[in-house]
Image (spheres, helix red, strand yellow):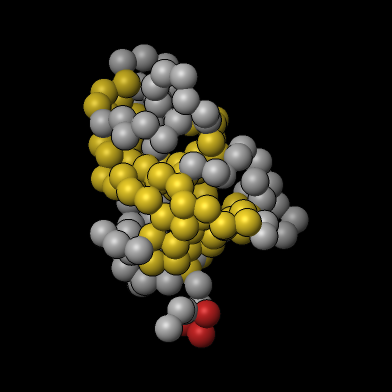
Amino acid sequence: MLFRESSRWRSAGRTADWEEYAKFTLKKGLPTDQRPRTLAVENEPHFVDDFDGVIKEGYGKGEKRLIYSGTGVIKVGGSRQLGKINVHEHDAEEADFHYDFVAEGVDPHTESFEVNIANGVLKGRYALLKARGSSRAAWEPWSWKDRPV
């Protein structure tokens, strides 16, 4: 589950010899103040490459528009690091319209992590948590009491 603290949201890409990270598809859109939780389904690993354009073939065939490229604090387990984040709007012929999220440092099959984006339209703190008894994850915001001062 993806949980969202505040602000607005949207979402991933591909290219050359870069390391691949976990990519999450958010079919119903990204968390907002009005809808603080949204289902996130892990997809095939992707690069954080600022891709913006048309995918000409395959399941992802269609237009992918980069709506956010920036750096955030990514916490996996007990370690924190700065990492690049890409968020795309993806209008795929077979998969239909959805958002994609990929961040450096989040390896495939990571069950939970936190992201803090300090600026831009996605400014906020997010947590990805695997729902109990499920193979799916969801994004949620931090509760207001957990918000940094």
In the depicted structure, whether residue 21 falls above or below residue 118? above
Does the rendering let one see residue 84? Answer: yes
In the depicted structure, whether residue 100 falls above or below residue 63? below
In the depicted structure, whether residue 65 falls above or below residue 129? above
| For residue 9, side relative to residue 115 (left or right) | left
- Residue 105 x/y as whole percent: 55, 44
| For residue 104, side relative to residue 10 (left or right) | right
Does the rendering let one see residue 89? Answer: no
Position of the N terminus by quadrant: bottom right
- The residue closer to the viewer here, 27 or 31, is 31
**Which residue is at a point 31% across and 30% down the rendered structure image?**
51
| For residue 12, side relative to residue 67 (left or right) | right
Quarter of the figure with residue 96: top left
In the depicted structure, whether residue 63 falls above or below residue 10? above
- The residue closer to the viewer here, 97 or 148, is 148
**Which residue is at a point 60% across and 40% down the rendered structure image?**
107
Position of the C terminus by quadrant: bottom left
- Residue 99 x/y as whole percent: 37, 44
